[in-house]
Image (cartoon, grey):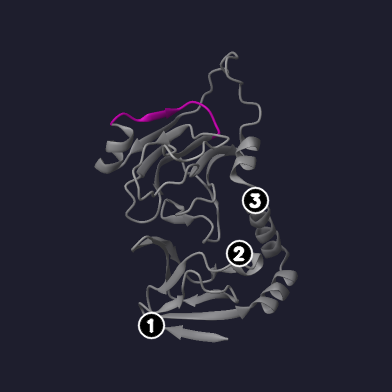
Amino acid sequence: MRRQFGSGEIVFRQGDPSDCVVLVRSGRVEVLRAAGADAILLGTAGDGEFIGEMGVLEARARSATVRAATDLEVELIDRSAFLERVSRDPALAHKLLTRMSTRLRHVEDLLAQLYAGRAEPGSAPPPETRLALELHAATYATKFYVGLEPIVIRHLPFTVGREPAADEVAAGASADLAIAEPEPYRLSRLHFVLQAENGGIWLRDLNSELGTIVNGTPLGRDFPHDVLALRAGANSVVAGGKGSPFEFTLIVA
């Protein structure tokens, strides 16, 4: 079924039942998540992109609100029709199954795999690598949290996240860069990871609450992708949605 929405109209709301998948035919949508009394813009999606497919497959309520950013035409595909489409498209099926299998594993299980082979505490340090990665604070707000000097990354994987609060249970794995952030939080305890894969450097969102935006592409549970290859030179990284105080420039030399 095709539907049109005017700019600013709500396509679906956070907490609604996931009874259909939305395919954007023309225009753009904004994806927002409630955070207390505020709504945080996580990113946008446009022509040809599916919205809400993981909620349909996992039979869970909508995890975010989707709002028309422009005049919009969408196709609403009910669950049975979407599953039939997936069965006819092996590439789409593979992508969805891969994302589901990653999400069904706890973040700590994923990190245990990423950290396999890292030296145990008290053992000899790993040999010096030839990585040329630097993480720079891109705004004054970010500099307040992480300092003025660039962070030189000498090993992969390298995780970025939030320091636990005093009343939080310690996670099984801590972030390499753990940032002390007061409430309300924009960062998840384990927010994103840098890893070497397929001959390049990739950034993967670790199923964070508010997602990660890399070079303008939103990553996370509410978007088509969780991971993106970094380009040589400067890369823009925003952790925690549009307007987050955590904006970085990641230099890949």
Q: Residue furthest left?
A: 140
Q: Which residue is mark 3?
A: 102
The amino acid on which the numbered mark 3 sits, given as a three-letter code, is: Thr
Residue 6: which disc? 1
Queried whether the magenta region covers residue 155, the answer comes back as: yes
The amino acid on which the numbered mark 1 sits, given as a three-letter code, is: Gly
Give the total of numbered labels.
Answer: 3
Residue 29 appears anywhere in the view: yes
Q: Residue at x 51, y 39 (%)?
A: 169
In this view, 71 is above or below 234: below
Decide: few, some or many residues near mark 1? Use Cα within 10 Å; few <14, some 14-19, many ≥20. Answer: some
The amino acid on which the numbered mark 2 sits, given as a three-letter code, is: Met
Q: Which residue is mark 2?
A: 54
Q: What segment carries the magenta color?
A: 148-157
Decide: few, some or many residues near mark 2? Use Cα within 10 Å; few <14, some 14-19, many ≥20. Answer: many
Quadrant for the C terminus, please. Answer: top left
Q: State how far apart marks 2 and 1 are (Cα).
A: 25 Å
Which circle, 2 or 1, is nearer the viewer? 2
Q: State how far apart marks 2 and 3 are (Cα).
A: 12 Å
Queried whether the magenta region covers residue 19, the answer comes back as: no
Nearer-N-terminus badge (1/3): 1
